[in-house]
Amino acid sequence: MDLLLLVLLLVAPVHTWLSLEDWGSGSVEGSVGEFGECVCNVYLPDTSFPADRMEVIQTTSSQLSVKVKLQINKIINLKIQLDVLLSSLSNLTARVEILESGPDKYIKLDFELLRIELREFELLVTQLKASLNSSSPAFESLYTEIRNMSLIVDQLESYDRSNLEVIRIEFTKLQRKLEKCQDDQDDFSNAEIGSCKHGGILRIGKPVISQLNADLTSSYAYGGWGKDSKPMPGSENMYWYSASSDTTVNRIIQYSDYYKLIMRQPFKIHSLYVQYSYDRRGTGNNYVVRENTMYYQFRSPFAMAKWNMTSATIEYKVVPEASTQFSYHYSANQNLDFAADESGLWVTYATAESNGTLVLGKINEQSFEVEEVWQTSIFKKSATNAFMICGVLYVTRSVDTQTEEIFYTYDTNKNEESYISIAFEKFQDFYVYLDYNPTDQRLYMFNNGYYVYYNMKFKVV
């Protein structure tokens, strides 16, 4: 019996030498026979190789490998898209912050572009989430950030409709004005301030309307405004204004600068009349301010007057030849017309001896006397106003309700008169004050109660 077992072990396949645990489906059973002998039953496993199953396993493994590679490539591509998304989202956040920072950064198209981009970002996040089949908190954070940015954009646009749109409209108007200013750029002075190295006026720009007078009434149609033609140190920016409902000159108001003039915030009001105290009133509206002194037509007696606003003293001088019979076309009582330019202080008037034609006189500022005169050929009542630039008298007349014309000049430097035609636009038909200021080379007009000024272009010598 023992010999039989040995033979069986020797002829058995090699794998039968393995431990029982490794035999797979093989097994050994022992029992006692009928006659008490020992019986062993050996059951060997199927020794045929499962090639068909092995082929299926290999095919499946190859297919899984391809799928894994595809998923890895997809993840890599999605990672690239995610990086681009995060970068774009960061850029979008910066743009929204710029919009929040102030109305001047606003561009109306930006709102719609931001919405489109936010929708694209949300779609991309959704695709990314579906592709990865993930519910990571990172995706929820992205969704939250996109929703928050959408709300901010909506709020900004809502704010725009109530506020920024008004700013945009005003900005458009301003832009048009700037474009117009660009078109009118050639109307600005091309001569150095204080210099007379030019050939006289070439043209006059469009009227610049500052605002209605400080009394806020168009009934104050008689008056004037402007700057000191020879300012005291520290008063270079000072403006003045005087007006009334008739030709009487009752007061003069001073402002420290243009802003204060526009805001109606004077620093000094000089009254020329105090009942039972003094009467220094004037008449007519052709005064000027020079070295903080107002030169105007005294009411009684009819004379030249100078009101020193620093010392609050007055002086007047009668001009024997001057007549009260001749005034400008637009208004009565404009008998003495004061002017100031680069060369000093002037006055124009008419005399009976000259049959009402204009006489130009140069005033000595120290003695307050007319020291030299020039006779013109212009009948004063046909003229609307006159002013001086570099010793040259310019006389105006009305063409129509919208147009004024410089039609005559008298050059005191050459003792020559000439007829010219330089038309310029009027804001409104009626005006009583027109004077040149050498400190900024502008013409100042008081036009039916409004502050108006003109820039000028000079001829190149």
Image: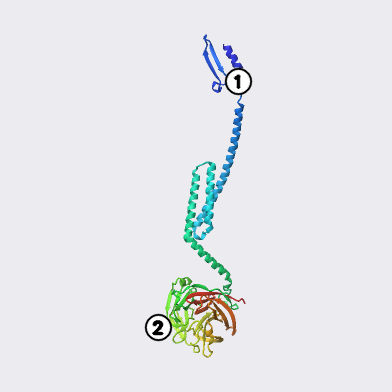
Above or below for 262 versus 134: below
Viewer-closest of 100 and 290: 100
Q: Are marks 2 and 1 in contact (CB under 8 Å)?
A: no
Viewer-closest of 392 and 333: 333
In the displayed structure image, the side of residue 185 where residue 145 appears, left or right: left
- What's the image's color scheme? rainbow
The furthest residue to the front: 400
Near mark 2 (Cα within 10 A), the count class, few <14, some 14-19 or many ≥20, is few
Which corner quadrant holds the N terminus? top right
Viewer-closest of 115 and 367: 115
The furthest residue to the bottom: 353
Whichever of callouts 2 and 1 sits on the residue coming sooner in the sequence is 1
Which corner quadrant holds the C terminus? bottom right
The residue singled out by tag 2 in the image is 278
Under tag 2, what secondary structure?
strand
Above or below for 360 versus 8: below
In the displayed structure image, the side of residue 60 where residue 234 appears, left or right: left
- Give residue 343's position: percent from left, percent from top: 55, 80
- Give residue 344's position: percent from left, percent from top: 53, 81
Q: How many marks?
A: 2
Quick check: can you spot residue 161? yes
Under tag 1, what secondary structure?
helix
How far apart are labels 2 and 1 at the CA level?
145 Å
